[in-house]
Amino acid sequence: MFKIAIIPGDGIGIDVTKEAVKVLEVFRDKRGTPIELNFFDYGAEKYLATGISMPDEQIEEFKQKYHAIFIGALGDPRIPDMAHARDILLGTRFKLDLFVNYRPVRLIDPKLCPLKDKTIEDVNFVVFRENTEGMYVGVGGHLKKYTDEEVAIQTSVNTYKGLERTIRHAFEFAKEQGLKEVTMSDKSNALRFEGDLWQRIFESVGKEYPDIGSRHLFIDALVMQLVKRPEQFQVIVTSNMFGDIVTDLGGQLQGGLGIAASGNLSPGQVSMFEPVHGSAPKYAGKNIANPIAAILSVQLLLEYLGFNEEGKLIESAVSTAIVSDKTTRDLGGNLGTKEVGDFICEQISKNL
Ligand code: NAD
Ligand code: IPM
Ligand code: MN
């Protein structure tokens, strides 16, 4: 039995998680997929009411007893500094050492691409984002806070181990998938020290994979090329911060954040899956949010656990929804969150 923790979180996270859970329930109840779903109410409401964000014992329980975690989204305008979200989201990523963030970018239907004349083959790459280091580590501080001499320092931390395992993961993925090239992107022309480490590790790991090309692009050139000719990319590996930015762009290339999925991985250990999007507070509770990013994140989760047939069933049901415009309005359809979830569940049930 595989134990899955579900944290709907805040805003539209709650709406889209309901639909993602419906998909998991179809597999559990109609196919007998051996999964157990356990729900956790970590998020803004709990934090505001109790001051509890994500206790360390909870993280420990996830580590010891769970196989996967699903998070809807976090973020609430009543907590402008995102304190709870940092603990829950970044806490899960950091404390479970989910060192690589896998963010596939795959165009399902050409009509969704904002670029002219792009086919589904043209927009089909993955981004591996280093997930526990860089600018996100929280090293820094303020000096003379609230004075006109205030100083704010935010340090980027890059370890040999952190970069090596992320870069290696990208090459291993390319090897398994029979892909021909990995592109590493940094800003080594300006950020010398971390750039130097990224460059050296990328070169040395790349040498171990002689059949796979190694290519480097500065991050500004990468975003330009992603819009100009996305078809040149298969696998991109980059830092935490650049990976965050580039995957919102990637999300838009496939039709918007409403369909961009991700997996925060520590291969062989409990890992966490979530849509790339946030809590979009203005759409919360209105049956407007697109549940497909959440449902495709469930696909990644099930595949991670080895349920590849289930993964294929989700992929094909989502494609049918998109091709036949059974979608929310961000994708040009006129259904609500719940109705899209229902349609996808019906498609899956039909094909079981
Ligand atoms: P957001 O991703 O929540 O929304 C940006 C815009 O993208 C929305 O206004 C909407 O137009 C579109 N969008 C996003 N998800 C959609 C969906 N499922 N269906 C349809 N349209 C969708 O980003 P934001 O507005 O910058 O952030 C809102 C809050 O979410 C903030 O508190 C932010 O920090 C947080 N956030 C959380 C996560 C996360 O939990 N992983 C990710 C990003 C942002
Ligand atoms: C994401 C989000 C998070 C990040 C935020 C909410 C901290 O934007 O998952 O892409 O920057 O990693
Ligand atoms: Mn982001």
Image (cartoon, rainbow, N blue to C red):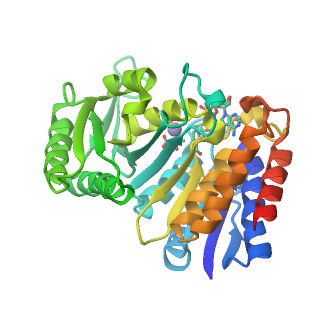
- Total marks placed: 0
Based on the displayed image, in which of its 4 quarters is residue 191 positioned? Answer: top left
Q: Position of residue 37 (x, y in %)?
A: 70, 71
Give residue 12's quadrant in the image: top right
Q: Residue at x 40, y 66 (%)?
A: 267
| Left or right, 33 with reference to 187 | right
Q: Nearer the viewer, residue 55 or 280?
A: 280
Examine the rendering and report whether any part of residue 54 can be seen: no
Whether residue 129 is visible to the viewer of this picture, yes or no, is yes
Q: Is residue 102 left or right of residue 299?
A: left
Residue appearing at x 86%, y 46% in the figure: 339
The quadrant of the image that shows the N terminus is bottom right
Compared with 34, 346 (above or below) is above
Coordinates of residue 335 in the picture (x, y in percent): 85, 38
The one nearer the camera, 202 or 349, is: 349
Image quarter of the C terminus: bottom right
Q: Residue at x 44, y 60 (%)?
A: 265
Position of 266 with respect to 192 (left or right) is right
Q: Indicate the position of residue 314 as horizontal and vertical percent values.
A: 67, 57
Vertical side of 193 occupied by 73: above or below: below
Q: Percent position (x, y) of residue 4?
A: 63, 70
Q: Residue at x 39, y 37 (%)?
A: 241
Q: Nearer the viewer, residue 2 or 7?
A: 2
